[in-house]
Amino acid sequence: MSIYQKFCTEQFDAQGRLQKLTLDIPADFNFSFDVVDAIARETPDKQAMVWCNTENEEHIFTFDDMMRQSCRAANVFKSAGIGRGDRVMLVLKRHYEYWFAVLALHRLGAVAIPATHMLTESDFAYRIRMADVRGIVCTWQNGVPEKIRSALAATGARAKLWCVQKDAEGFDNLTRAMQSAPDSFPRVPTRAEDPMLLYFTSGTTGEPKGVIHDFSYPLAHIVTAKYWQQAEEGGLHFTVAETGWAKASWGKLYGQWLVGSAVIVYDFDNFDPRQLTAVINRYGVTSFCAPPTVYRYLVRKGIPAMPTLRHASTAGEMLAPEIFKKFTEQTGLPLYEGYGQTETTLLMANFRGGDPCAGSMGTISPFYNIELRRKDGQKAAPGEIGEVVVVPPGSGRQCGVFCGYLDNDEQYARAWRGGVYHTGDAAWMDEEGRFWFHGRFDDIIKTGGFRVGPYEVENVLMEHPAVLECSVVGVADALRGQAIKAIVVPVRGYEPSPALAQELREFCNSRLADYKWIRIVEFTDEMPKTISGKIQKRLQRG
């Protein structure tokens, strides 16, 4: 029996398909103590994680290893004054130290802030300032320690700093400190409703929002892992995601361990489909999840036989039907698409036991009550476009949906207006009960599996003296799903030209994280605007 069954009740139909999942959440639930430690005590040698990298290094960790190493990290953090409610940023790429650190912070009742190494100095400064960060644990690679030092200097903030594996100026070496730290840690009282994770997610207007999840959040990923990704007891699950993104929580830790599956982590910088499939075959991966961008690369390059792989899933952006068809033809495996947000867990998907349909969001998760609602608040009829909203249970609290925006109660109240959570996403339902994504009510750009808010790019673009006015949108791109396009009204005296377009791209891209790069520049004399002066981006996307 997998440990997840201690925390939920499942109801199935006559065909064995999950119809409803109800959680039984202990008031003091803590994933580190109640899942990791419980498994470690019962089956200490059970495999938790296989880690490898492009240099052919390999580490295999049991649940006993995870328990002891995270206890060591917790003792290091505690000795530095980190405690319950303190916010600690983790910039650890795909290093195995992320798992030690995040589990340690759970033990302490602290709040983990996963962040990508691709952030710029100003990105780090914004997060440090907004979250009042008390500590930062980072990689030694990609100039991250230098960017963090500069960000701290720019904000005047102070934080306890650790680097893993190697020494960095101004940082303690967490790897070395853990070696002499005790490998046990007493339980710290925490509550299921305490804040546990803080993700910064891109918005269409304003700076990135801080999305807060509580300690019950891991349990909401049981459906994610078992019934969408189809991770299984004794299996090995591989999700392609860096730890700075919420997708890592979806596929590299919580749900998979709850249902008894180990996870594999491949530490790389530059994606190579041949290396990826080699890792799948070398370690016998049984379930795999990646954004459509990865599947596009795999299909284009040709997919070798992967005899151990039994299930493949995808999320993050729309999947082209031809990619679905070609992947299935080459592997014999259909692709199970899923849909959710940083603010939620899996809301809809093509689930175990169903017939996955290319391009469909699938059906509603048995864990949620979801409706499509028109602008007047009424339910949308089949075939009619409506907004995806989450309707909470009678108690008014919905596990799996975020519990707040950082220091922005007004924005949180707006997201929950009318007693339901508004996703801002439009969809329609067909006669068979499948849902189909129509578009966003906001203007988030999804490119290569990443979410980019136009405001983040427009802010940089406006710094160039040639730019009078600008708008950034996502346009269809065969490789990335969407490419970032900048539409510019030039300042008088600057003539539109290929040379100026190239200058603007180079100016912005040298100041932006790679995934935010502008790919296309278009010039215009005037922006299409509403009567209130807002740029109509939907007209610019074409």
Image (cartoon, rainbow, N blue to C red):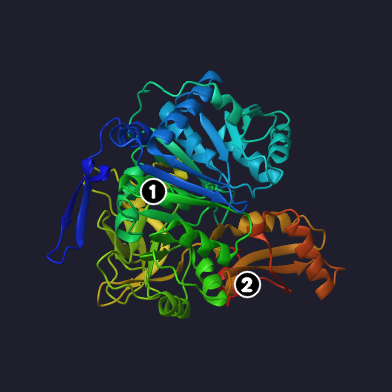
Image quarter where the N terminus lies is top left
Q: Read off the residue under disc 1.
A: 262
Q: Residue 251 in the image: state x and y as whole percent.
A: 42, 52
Residue 149 horizontal side relative to residue 503, left or right: left
Tell me the residue at 32%/72% (across/down).
356
Q: Residue 385 in the image: state x and y as whole percent.
A: 36, 72
Q: Residue 194 in the image: state x and y as whole percent.
A: 38, 32
Quarter of the figure with residue 379:
bottom left
- Mark 1, secondary structure of its residue: strand
Image quarter where the C terminus lies is bottom right
Tell me the residue at 51%/21% (across/down).
181
**Mark closer to the observer (1, 2):** 1
Quarter of the figure with residue 501:
bottom right
Residue 472 horizontal side relative to residue 504, left or right: left
Q: Residue 500 in the image: state x and y as whole percent.
A: 82, 69
Tell me the residue at 46%/64% (across/down).
441
| Foreground of the two, 208 or 304 | 304
| Foreground of the two, 539 or 82 | 82
Q: Amino acid at mark 2?
A: Pro
Q: Earlier in the sequence, mark 1 or mark 2?
A: 1
Inspect this view and state whether residue 110 appears. no
Residue 437 horizontal side relative to residue 418, left or right: right
Q: Amino acid at mark 1?
A: Ala
Q: Which mark is residue 528?
A: 2
Q: Residue furthest left?
A: 14
